[in-house]
Amino acid sequence: ATVAHTMDVRSYIAHAGEQVLCYHGPMLYSAKCVKIQNFEDEDGRPVIKYKIHYQGWRARYDEWVAGDRIVGDHEEGKELQRSLKESAERNQKEQAARKKSAKARKATFDKKVRRSDDFTRVGDDVVIPSGDTPILNGARKRPRLDSESAAADACETVFTVASLPPALRTQLVDDWNYVSQERRLVPLPAKKHMAINDILKSFVATVTKTSAADGKLAREVAAGVESTFNAAIGSVLLYPFERLQFSELISGHPGTPFSQLFGVEHLIRLLVILPQQLTLEKVAATSRLHKGFDLLIDFLSDRSGLYLVDEYEMAPPPYIRGNTQLGHGKPEA
């Protein structure tokens, strides 16, 4: 609100008709102070505001601003204006480069997806790359019992890359790029409360709060997923570049279940091949199996950001040399 208070003109930051520089967002723009007026703040105290007209902008963009947004139109102010502009341009270029890099990674992944001979398939859908990625082709498949066949066939196309929620699908693509292309590693063992065992406990507790019946199903699914992960991690869920890390992890944590050492990054990999690997006897009805998996997928999609590591770590040169000697890495340039 405007007030009738009079204030000493010596306290003015600028005067009417004066050329100034004014902040609009993070940038400083050339402007003109066209009017000065006294207002009251929320506590009823008098405050001076300045009506600013930005050079080259229409009058409808004129606005009343506080003195802390105004900088004098002198050499120091102009130098600050140039510095902010250069910083903004650098940020724009960096953002554009990051977007271009992300687009290129996605294009590379999509190109690999179109090459059917480089991928393991479930039904008619590509699920996850093989060969230079997780060792699926060489995995020994457990022979299925006749009683399992119908249920397995009914859910074989449930968990493909394309059918995962966007948050999990993006993570799967980034995961592939970091490990296979950039030779980075997921930091292991997983931090406290971020291991698969802890994630599944949280999943069960969360679902149980909503429905006791769904909670019972969630416990069955969690038990099946955890036992399947512990059995599958060493044979079908690792990229070749990770196998040396896996060996070192086993040596450092003998007897510890893998579900207590690995986090959500490796759990998401399991989701796209789960129909091939899960022991279906643990859940009798296929419809219940689907519902249980849907609950887990929704839980992970909503909370994946809480469990994902902040950053994949760069593999040190000795590790890369060790992988090269084992035939799992690329020679250093």
Image: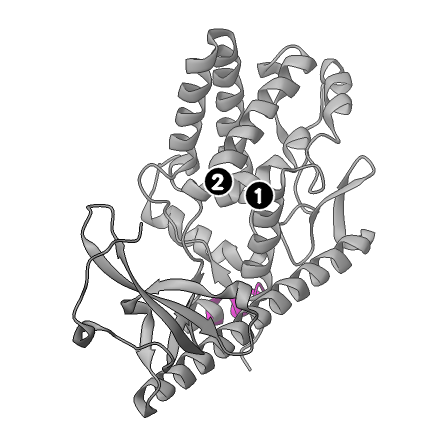
Residue at the spot 54% in from the left edge and 68% down from the top edge: 59
Crowd class of label 2 (few under 14; some 14 to 19; many from 20; radius 10 Å): some
Q: Residue 208's x, y, as percent?
A: 44, 14
Q: Are marks 2 and 1 in contact (CB under 8 Å)?
A: yes
Looking at the picture, does residue 159 appear above or below residue 144?
Answer: below
Looking at the picture, does residue 4 appear above or below residue 124?
Answer: below
Is 327 colored magenta in this rendering? yes
Taking the view exactly as shown, the residue that stands out farthest to the top is 213
Toward the viewer: 325 or 165? 165
Toward the viewer: 310 or 98? 98
**Which residue type does callout 1 highlight?**
Ala
Q: Residue 243's x, y, as percent?
A: 51, 54
Sequence-wise, which precedes: disc 2 or disc 1? Answer: 1
Q: Residue 80's x, y, as percent?
A: 35, 83
The residue pinned by badge 1 equals 167
**Which residue type does callout 2 highlight?**
Ser
Q: Residue 237's x, y, as percent?
A: 57, 44
Left or right: residue 83 versus residue 288 is left
Secondary element type, mark 2? helix
The quadrant holding residue 32 is: bottom left
Q: Which region is colored magenta? A: 321-329
Toward the viewer: 272 or 309? 309
The residue pinned by badge 2 equals 304
Is residue 183 visible from the viewing direction of this image? Answer: no
Looking at the picture, does residue 117 appear above or below residue 280?
Answer: below
Toward the viewer: 37 or 145? 37
Badge number at residue 71? none
Residue at the spot 55% in from the left edge and 76% down from the top edge: 93
